[in-house]
Amino acid sequence: MSFREETEEGRNDLRRPFLHTGSWYRMGSRQSSMLESSQVIRDSSISVLACVLIVALGPIQFGFTCGYSSPTQAAITKDLGLTVSEYSVFGSLSNVGAMVGAIASGQIAEYIGRKGSLMIAAIPNIIGWLSISFAKDTSFLYMGRLLEGFGVGVISYTVPVYIAEIAPQNMRGALGSVNQLSVTIGIMLAYLLGLFVPWRILAVLGVLPCTLLIPGLFFIPESPRWLAKMGLTDDFETSLQVLRGFDTDITVEVNEIKRSVASSSKRSAIRFVDLKRRRYYFPLMVGIGLLVLQQLGGINGVLFYSSTIFESAGVTSSNAATFGVGAVQVVATAVATWLVDKSGRRLLLMISSIGMTISLVIVAVAFFLKEYVSPDSHMYNILSMVSVVGVVAMVIACSLGMGPIPWLIMSEILPVNIKGLAGSIATLANWFVSWLVTMTANMLLAWSSGGTFTLYALVCGFTVVFVSLWVPETKGKTLEEIQALFR
């Protein structure tokens, strides 16, 4: 039985894409000679890169949401009369919304496609930012943050999956790392603009990434692997053709994807009980483990409340220092994007987690020693500088591996027939732990800055062990080859 015959049977039960791919490249795939003026589209790397740059607006929105709470803390608490705990609730509510988005993200992306789920994610983000901008009390403030979080939860799952499914295997690492690079750019923009504009205007500016994303989605193809899974054979081949270039022979890749999808379609629907099988539970364990350890290492606690951390370290211009951290994070993540397809995922994860452990130990020791030194002494100033350098080093180390790579590996290793269910579970776990970290970070820092960074260091030390024992190398393998590793 052919692929078409196997999938045609259940066609009535399959969903059409929420956003159809445009006719501009359908014509081109059949009459490429007529598109001499569209040479840019013919280049496969440029075609894929254009798609990645458009969907990267989603992670920029993600980053802007994460970074917003740091430069605005003093102004919002003053204008609305919030306590530290009330502001901590505001900061962490984006994670609560993201948990809801994570629960829904896998099923939304499976039912209406990757592009349709990004459209659904963009709308509550826009409404959420406007709600914060016009907030007069905590009700609108909290509601806006929850709506933002929902959109971010869907984006955080869908974008890395979409990129992994459209990218050629030799570019998948670099293109997949663009997701986290865009997050860091969003964080940096929030830090930078927060230096110059009031918090209400900053919230209005937060609308821009998703406002640009919505029209951009109409100009990119849907994921060919999702189209193949849905039995939309013509759309699948056309989408893959435009992604690889009109002059590229895609026969081998088409057949490989067809075999993988045909094999998975023969199996019955996946239930929670099926996750006990090693081919499913092992990649899910690796994905959840990396995403949970990423958060328990404290990176979001540092990024959400970096201004407060720098103030406690004795930095006079904490918001400017926070922007410096954001800029350094972008540069380090860009380096990781360049390295990930050269050095591999495992090596970068090891270097990153070891670097984070050392940096956090230095910060913890500096904060502990400051308790025994006079604030007016020269030693106190030295320890303040050491703690700041340690925080910056921790952010750099995280950006080299533990920031971008867990999302990349999650999108690579989950088998196609459990990607919706398992992806939702992994994303939910990440956002739940992120909520715990951001909710408790301010209170832990008030309890003991040295103790807080010691806890984070212990987690990063365990991450080194986890990566060395259980994380597989996926560099240079197709998604179908990666899935075969677990069979």
Image: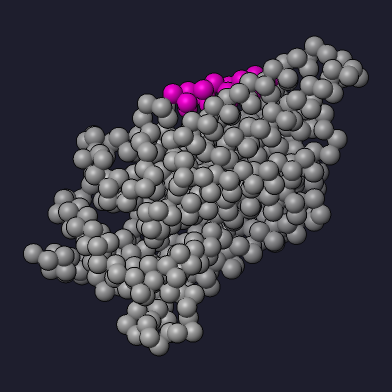
Q: Which residue does the image show at 69% across and 37% down from the upper left?
A: 305
In-image side of 123 versus 476 (left or right): right
Instruction: Using the image as rendered, state which of residue 141 and residue 256 is in the foreground.
Output: 256
- Tell which of 435 and 450 is nearer to you: 450
Quadrant of residue 133 within the rendered picture: bottom right
Relative to the observer, which residue lies in front, 97 or 290?
290
Q: Residue at x 36, y 43 (%)?
A: 474
For the C terminus, the quadrant is top left
Residue at 38% over, 33% down:
471
Q: How many marks?
A: 0
Q: As drawn, is 13 to the left or to the right of 449?
A: left
Q: Quadrant of the N terminus?
A: bottom left
- Could you tell me residue 400's position as x and y percent? 56, 39
Residue most extreme to the bottom: 34
Give the residue furthest to the top: 372
* Residue 93, percent from left and from top: 58, 44
Q: Relative to 365, does residue 444 appear above or below in the rendering?
A: below
In this view of the protein, can residue 437 be seen by the observer?
A: no
Query: Furthest-left residue in view?
Result: 1
447 to 324, vertically: above or below: above
Query: Is residue 212 on the magenta stretch?
Result: no
| Magenta span includes 451 | yes
Q: Which image quadrant for residue 381?
A: top right
The kind of secondary structure the magenta stretch mainly shows is: helix
Front position in the image: 106 or 129:
106
User: Residue 389, position in %: x, y?
Assistant: 73, 30
- Magenta region, residue range: 450-465
Image position, residue 335 (x, y; %): 58, 46
- Which residue is located at x 25 percent, y 39 percent? 486
Does any portion of residue 348 appear in the rendered image?
A: yes
